[in-house]
Amino acid sequence: MKEPAHYTELQVTTNFSFLRGASHPEELVDQAAADGYHAIAITDRNSVAGIVRGHVAAKAKGIRIIPACRLDLLDGPGLLAYPTDKAGYGRLSALLTTGNLRAEKGDCHLYKADVYAHKDGIRFIAIPPLALTPAFEVDPAFAQTLPEYREAFGTELYLAATRRYLGDDAKQLHRLSQLATPGYRSPW
C-alpha cells in the first residue's frame, strides 16, 4: 500500500448513477485503498444506492466511506449532500423518496424547497457549472442562487472547486473564490 494520501475525494459516482458512473462501488474502494486514501465519499446522483456496497468494501480495506449524494435540482444548481448523523441520513433518504415518488422510475424530481425542508443534519457543497461564460465569469444563474443557498444552509454550505485542466482553471478558481467570500456582491 502506498503512503497514506492527505486527500479525500468528495465526489465519486458509481455505476448506480446510470449513464454517469461506470465503476462498481467495490472497484472504486479498491482503487482508493491502492492510492492510499483514508476515505472517499460516494455521491451518486439522486441516490444512495452505492453506499452499502461501498461501505462493505471499505470496511474490508480499512478505509472509510463518507455517505453522500449528489442532488440534481429542477430549479437550481446541484448540491452535494453529506449527512452528519443518522437523523440527517434519514432526512436525506426521505428527501430522495419525495423526489422519486414524483417521477417515473429512474428519475428523481427535486426542488430547492424540498432540500430546505430536509436540510437539518446535512452539510452541502454547491456545485458550480463546469463551463465559464465567454467573459470568463461564473454562470449568472449560479451566482444569483448562491446567496439563497447561504441563507438557507448557513455554515453548513461550502463551494466546490475542481481543476479541469483546460487552461482556464486559474480564472475559474478566482471567480469561485470571489463568490465564496462573505460580503462579495455579484455583478448580477
Image (cartoon, grey):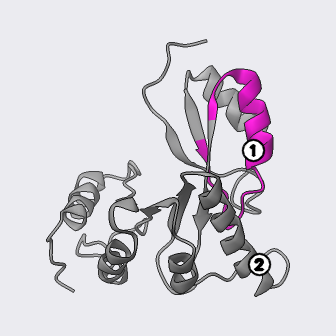
The range drawn in magenta is 41-64
Left or right: where 58 falls relative to 188: right
Q: Earlier in the sequence, mark 1 or mark 2?
A: 1
The verdict on residue 37 being magenta is no
* 23 relative to 89, above or below: above
Which residue has dot 2 on it? 100
Left or right: where 72 falls relative to 58: left
Left or right: where 165 falls relative to 66: left
Q: Residues within 10 Å of mark 2 (few under 14, many from 20)?
A: some
Which image quadrant: the C terminus? Answer: bottom left
Q: Residue at coordinates 63% horizontally, 59% vertically from top-left?
A: 87
Q: Residue at coordinates 71% horizontally, 50% vertically from top-left?
A: 14
- SS state under label 1: loop
Residue 54 vs residue 82, the one in the foreground: 82
Which image quadrant: the N terminus? Answer: top right
The verdict on residue 56 being magenta is yes
Q: Please provide percent x and percent y for residue 185.
A: 15, 77
Q: Please provide percent x and percent y for residue 145.
A: 36, 81
* 121 relative to 26, above or below: below
Residue farthest along the right direction in this orientation:
105
Which residue has dot 1 on it? 23
Q: Please provide percent x and percent y for residue 96.
A: 70, 72
Q: Please provide percent x and percent y for residue 157.
A: 38, 62
Q: Residues within 10 Å of mark 1 (few under 14, many from 20)?
A: some
Q: Residue at coordinates 50% horizontally, 78% vertically from top-left?
A: 116
State the separation of the CA atoms marked 1 and 2: 23 Å
Hey, what amino acid is under mark 2?
Asn
Confirm whether residue 22 shows in the render.
yes
